[in-house]
Amino acid sequence: SSKIFSIPQRQIVAIQWYLGEVNNGGHDQFYLNSTGIVWEDALNGLKLIGAREIASILTQSTQRMGGKPNKDRGQRQAQLTKLEPKFHDLDERLYSSQANIDQKMRDFIRKNRKAFYFKGDVKVYPH
């Protein structure tokens, strides 16, 4: 359940999924895969950490998806099929806009340490 994660944790993980998917296969892959469900957390997180250019790129990609990519993967894939959005320009912009993103995430985590503390038990299973 996502309730055990703080909102800042969810946002940082969402940013990492977004960047990982787009760097691997473009915005098409991000929206096609199940990870596309995190677009809103990623967008809010990017704004929060001050990554304005990447937030702008993600916003433009959502507009090409009709303004609000569906959280349901099947519905989102239907949106891709119906709208046939072209993302190449946004993919290229993202590839050249990531110089400081890791530092921005680290700074955000340091400023919000409490939101990233883990409370609970870690289960270690023998190999």
Image (cartoon, rainbow, N blue to C red):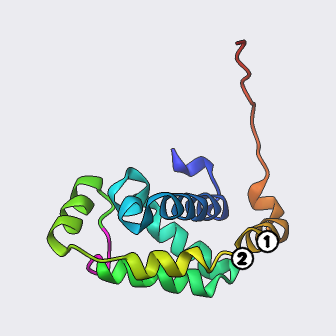
- Residue behind mark 2: 99
* In-front residue for pair 103/23: 23
Label 2 Cα neighbours within 10 Å, binned few <14 / some 14-19 / many ≥20 = few
As rendered, which of 88 and 127 lies closer to the eye? 88
Instruction: Report the residue at 21% width, 68% height from top.
Output: 79
Residues drawn in magenta: 65-69
Q: Magenta-highlighted stretch: main secondary structure?
A: loop
Q: Residue 60 appears at what percent x and percent y?
A: 41, 85
- In which image quadrant can residue 37 be found? bottom left
Q: Which residue is most to the left?
A: 82
Badge 2 marks a residue whose secondary structure is: loop
Q: Is residue 66 magenta?
A: yes
Decide which of 80, 6 is in the foreground and name it: 80
Q: Across the whole image, how many numbered discs are drawn on residues?
A: 2
Secondary structure at numbered mark 1 = helix
**Residue 123 percent location from the top left of the image:** 72, 24
Residue 127 falls left or right of residue 78: right
- Mark identifier at residue 77: none
Choose top left, top right, bottom left or bottom right for residue 48.
Answer: bottom right
Residue picked out by circle 1: 103
